[in-house]
Amino acid sequence: MAAYTEGGAYAYLVYAILPLLKLICLTVIGLILAHPKTKIVPKATFKLLCKLVFALFLPCTIFIHLGEAITLKNFMRWWFIPVNVIVSIAIGCLLGYLVTKICRTPPEFNRFTIIATAFGNTGNLPLAIVGSICHSEDNIFGPDCHSNGVAYVSFSQWIAVLLVYTLVYHMMEPPLDYYEVVEEGLEIQEHLPPANDLSRPLLLEAEWPGMEENETVHCKTPFVARIFTSAASMSQISIPDPEFLEEAPPSPKSIRCLVEPRVVRKIRIVAERTPIQHVLQPPTFATLLAFIVGMIPPVKSFVYGDDAPLSFLTDSLEIMAQAMVPSVMLILGGMLAEGPNESRLGIRTTVGIIVARLLVLPLLGIGVVTLADKANILIPDNQMYRFVLLLQYTTPTAILLGAVARLRNYSVSEASALLFWQHVLALLSLSIYLIVYFKLLLS
């Protein structure tokens, strides 16, 4: 650490900016390759690269680093990482609500504003930042920088995915008051190109390709709002009445429904139609497999380590994992090359979300992590652990929000425009806060 303190304040500046400059270079290369004026690499290639990251590179990264670092003891010690994700989203929701009030957000975009402020990128981008910071052997976090950093970020993946298919999925439901029908069974929906159409924005597949394949009969309708609204006031909406959702011959299940409270029944109906089964995707499988292998010592010694019988397999997976960071940044460049879409969100709300997400939330995150440290909740003398916790408050809105928006057919163009401007301006905010974090962690 002495090498980093000799230069005083300039040292923090240099070692915070250099990792971002590396990522910016990769992003610019992706932008040039995908730009409409050059078209060196077609959009179809970028979409295939998205699928490779999602199905191969990211799972390999998670399994290699999380599995090697995780133990039953570490599993218990790292409990604050997923809790911190929940805390950051809760604070973000509060900030998003304040944005809707202060910026006078159009009512139909209130829930979108709240979730866009709250739900940050907890996966690909933090992994890329950690990978860039730890790329140099003389990095400020020591020789175990990369393995520990990737393990900490990967440990939060399961809670983030779980929240996508519960909280985010239902928050992105089309608002009932602005959901129109022209006649029975025919809803007015935003017309979007089919899944295999190359004109679709890259951001719809940049982080979670294939999400549109998880469509259900109610995913593009205000189903939850209909369930909890009286039938009398909503008789004109052509969504099945919850009273008739379970018409069937008498059975133990229908008998149970006769005696359970009305509110409990409605909650159960909503829960049954929450697509939680789609949580089991390649990155989630990799996380679960890493937990199982890593926490069983005989199995772990058989898989991980230079002398392990399966070391050839982990070495192969590690080679593929090294493609994750450059691929993610190239995809981000391809996404930015498409430019922003038109948005009805309004300039005030867009600016409000960006300020709340990129400037205010990280300040509050510093407070949360500092309080947790003073309460002896965090692992002692582990600066990378603290850095990952702070990073969870600092990243822009998750690109995954664009895919959810399309799945729910709600605020698709608004999500595209907001994600574009956030990721452009995040270069500045990340630079500022990385300097602040390094100063706090190394002083």
Image (tube, rainbow, N blue to C red):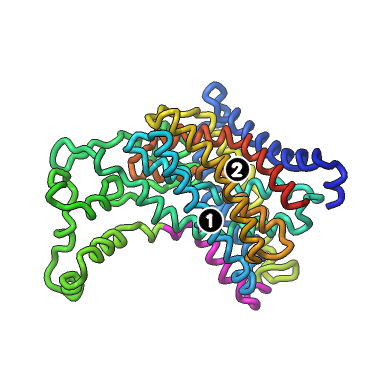
Considering every residue shown, the one lying at the far top of the view is 37
- The residue that appears at 47% across and 29% down in the rendered structure is 340
In terms of depth relative to the viewer, which is nearer, 150 or 226?
Answer: 226
For label 1, the SS is helix
**Disc 1 residue type (three-letter):** Val
Task: Please check the rendered image and state whether residue 292 is part of the magenta-colored stretch, yes or no.
Answer: yes
Where does the image place residue 269, in percent across and percent down from the top left? 26, 61
* Mark toward the viewer: 1 or 2: 1
Q: How far apart are marks 1 and 2 (CA)?
A: 25 Å
Q: Which residue is drawn at 43% across and 58% down?
A: 279
Q: For label 2, count other residues whose C-alpha is less than 10 Å away and answer few (under 14), some (14-19) or many (20+).
A: many
Relative to 63, 311 lies left or right? right
Q: Residue 234: image x %, image y %?
A: 16, 47
Circle 1 residues within 10 Å: few <14, some 14–19, many ≥20: many
Q: Can residue 64 be seen in this view?
A: no
Front residue of 361/258: it is 361
What is the span of residues highlighted in magenta in the rendered image?
Answer: 279-302
Seen from the viewer's position, the closer of residues 326 and 45 is 326
Q: Mark 2 points at which residue?
A: 327
> In the figure, is residue 93 to the left or right of 422?
left
Q: Position of residue 266 (x, y in %)?
A: 24, 61
Residue 347: percent from left, percent from top: 44, 28
439 is within the stretch colored magenta: no
Q: Which residue is drawn at 32% across and 38% down?
A: 108
Is residue 70 visible to the viewer in this orientation of the structure?
yes
Q: Mark 1 or 2 closer to N-term?
A: 1
Classify mark 2: helix, strand or loop: helix
- The residue to which callout 1 is attached is 85
Closer to us: 277 or 418: 418
Disc 2 marks a residue whose amino acid type is Ser
Determine whether 374 is above or below 433 in the image.
below
